[in-house]
Amino acid sequence: MKDYIQEHKERFLSELFELLRIPSISSSSEHKQDMYRCAEKLVQLLKEAGADRADVYETTGHPVVFGEKIIDPSKPTVLVYGHYDVQPVDPIELWKSAPFEPEIRDGAIYARGANDDKGQLFMHIKAFEFLCRTGALKHNVKFIFEGEEEIGSPSLAKWAREHKDMLKADDILVSDTTMIDEKVPSINCGMRGLAYLEVEVTGPNKDLHSGHYGGAVVNPINALCDMISSLIDEKGRITVKGFYDDVVELSAEDRAMLAKAPFDIEEYKHFLDIDDVNGEEGYSTPERTGIRPCLDVNGIWGGFTGEGAKTVLPSKAHAKISMRLVPNQNCDRIAELFAEHFKSIAPKGVRVKVIPHHGGNGFLTPISSNVYKAAARAIGEVYGIEPVPNRGGGSIPILADLQQILEINPLLMGFGLERDTIHSPNESYLLSQLFKGMESIALFYKYY
Amino acid sequence: MKDYIQEHKERFLSELFELLRIPSISSSSEHKQDMYRCAEKLVQLLKEAGADRADVYETTGHPVVFGEKIIDPSKPTVLVYGHYDVQPVDPIELWKSAPFEPEIRDGAIYARGANDDKGQLFMHIKAFEFLCRTGALKHNVKFIFEGEEEIGSPSLAKWAREHKDMLKADDILVSDTTMIDEKVPSINCGMRGLAYLEVEVTGPNKDLHSGHYGGAVVNPINALCDMISSLIDEKGRITVKGFYDDVVELSAEDRAMLAKAPFDIEEYKHFLDIDDVNGEEGYSTPERTGIRPCLDVNGIWGGFTGEGAKTVLPSKAHAKISMRLVPNQNCDRIAELFAEHFKSIAPKGVRVKVIPHHGGNGFLTPISSNVYKAAARAIGEVYGIEPVPNRGGGSIPILADLQQILEINPLLMGFGLERDTIHSPNESYLLSQLFKGMESIALFYKYY
């Protein structure tokens, strides 16, 4: 595939850039049309690559793209999952180049979605194109690209259940994660789940003058801070009642195996410009993001946030709070426990609303599976080093659903790097990873 | 004055409305020109009312209006203070009519500034007009209207020092506060001071994916909530080291006198739609806002606050935090203590910036003074009940400065009511209070 990439490089980049120019932000209703444009573009790319068919499917939300090439129904089938929707771009002022005007700087593509996940799903289309055009395709390949991953895939599980037969496959292949380092390639063998909620704390029924009322009326911002502060104890453990009930403690052996992945705490702190890390007592930093659950405030707002000073005692305060879950924790149950707990800790003088956003369960992929072995061999050959198994801290909730609906395991063969700062300003994707990813995927089919 | 009001009512309202239509928001630089328009309008009104002279004075910030009528330098002189700047109008969507398009509904004027302080300073101009035109003026009267009260009067103290001779007077008269109720008129004999600061908590140097980093890196929003939560203890006392050092405890006698002002806790809770009040242990609700200091978060923001869900672990979190102070607490000292304390409680893994906004000291006015007695008699006559002395929770920091620079006491003869919701959407001012205020002020000069 190396030569093929060399030959078609310019076209590859121009096709990918076209995809990146479409602002397919799933969380914002104003981009509804962009979602369709992006889906249509993917249909075109799949067909041009060699798919027998590719179509846009309506869902209750943003459309799904499905395409396939069936060479022989008796042969093994790989289902490739990816998502074409992207995160919002705020704070926009921190982008060095416009998020939807892709630009190559220092060997990397800078754009929203350059990595997550347009760049990574694009590798699959191009590896598939190579196999089709060189007559090397030995398996059936199906593609499913959704447009709602960044908002928790509210429609895909239902759609997948309705199209279960069409999606039938032996393995699910996904590139939507990172590897540890270019020099330390890795394959994710598990991901965390997610419960995401929004809370609203209401004190007085109107904004008040903080001079006239301050000191006598519960300030909903202060109350919200108190409540949030109480959610994590001094050992870094989440205080929501029942939160840890279903958490499976890893054996010393499992922890030792995962600790093999190299990790440099000084480099980590330097990369983030922090003087110290933090988290649950008794666990290492990779364990804190890999095998332990956590709770984070993703957003908070209330009162006067403009220029200058306004002496207001506000009526309301809000926060978005999410919990990362480990396999065996059920996201709906955790959302319920959180809502109950959060309401129970509200002080007198305020009312609390808890609105669940999306959620998803975590999952684990057996390292002994054929699909893992083929991926490890392919990556090992391209990178010149055997990849290490790893546990990802992020969540692709829909994968746990697909695993359950289709009764097959997803394999997370991600080529992103930490430096790509996905979800943040200046998201990027190294050209070297883009091309090595294509090569690895093409080789995967060889060893699968 | 009653007849005079009846006769000129329409003109009064049209003049006041003209004043209210000018969006003189001092905290926002885009309204710079509106400040001048408003100042010029006041000069015109003062001259038309009968002032010998009235002029706009430049300061380092927004302009000051000064006008006077000297009938005889040997007679007592009253200095009337007011401010023509107003609070911002956010959240604009909660206004029933446009904030700068005054409208009369149910006997009240609705507009930003209807009460605070355009409506209230207007009463002084019209009482003065009445006295001038009917030949009843027996004193010298000076007017000082500033344009920076809502942002802490950063320029007026310096300007007043430079114009000390021009401002020479025997008493300062101010209408910029509330009375307890139309049926329970009151005069403020003291106000709280203010220290207002903004804090910024920085964790990692960029927004991160909360899945990849959550649980291992200090989230600046969680840290900010922890820090804010620790600022008030379970007894409702502020934990900033040294905060209470200069607070003067009132005698049982003083507290008993202040407790004479009627206060209905059930009505108070009903008005605010809260199930309970809160505050410092051992003090009543009126004491908590009148004679005790407090701390409130006036605004908080950080992370993703848009529609939907974004799984971000943000780089920064911010809050605006203010403390109301009692007389004898120094606002600069308190701001310093706060900054020191807030930095000292920052956990590892974050950096903290504290930016002081404005501040001011509290003050007390003796009830035995002539100026208080004249005001009490005037209000008693107009309302048919003797007014009660009261302590205001708000802050007019500049009055403490003027008191010190000019060596005279301000008298707070306010006609606002709690229902006016100043600083909030739908600020209003009852026509009955506007006109009774004019009458009371005219009578004040009779008994002064």
Image (cartoon, coloured by chain):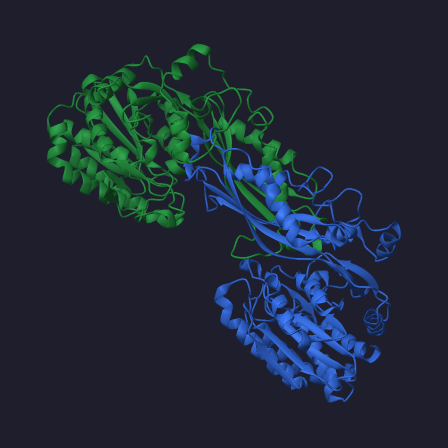
Chain colours: A green, B blue
x and y, in percent, of residue B188 in the image: 77, 63
Q: Quadrant of residue A223?
A: top right
Q: Dividing the image into 4 quarters, which one contains the C terminus of chain B?
A: bottom right
Q: Nearer the viewer, residue A287 or B192?
A: B192
Name the one closer to the observer, B161 or A308: B161
Instruction: Report x, y in % for residue B64.
Output: 60, 73
List x then y, in percent, for residue B177: 72, 64
Q: Residue at x 42, y 31 (%)?
A: A269
- Side of B377 where B355 appears, left or right: left
The answer to whether B345 appears left or right of A196 in the picture is: right
State whether residue B66 appears in this view.
yes
Quarter of the image where one finds residue B39: bottom right
Q: Is residue B249 above or below residue B391?
A: above
Q: Residue furthest top?
A: A253
Is residue B180 at least partly visible in the picture?
Answer: no
Rendered position, B373 above or below B283: below
Q: Residue at x 35, y 37 (%)?
A: A422
Count of numbered labels shown in the rendering: 0
Say left or right for B448 vs B340: right
**Residue A49 position (above or below residue A249):** below
> What x and y, as percent, mark residue B318?
52, 46
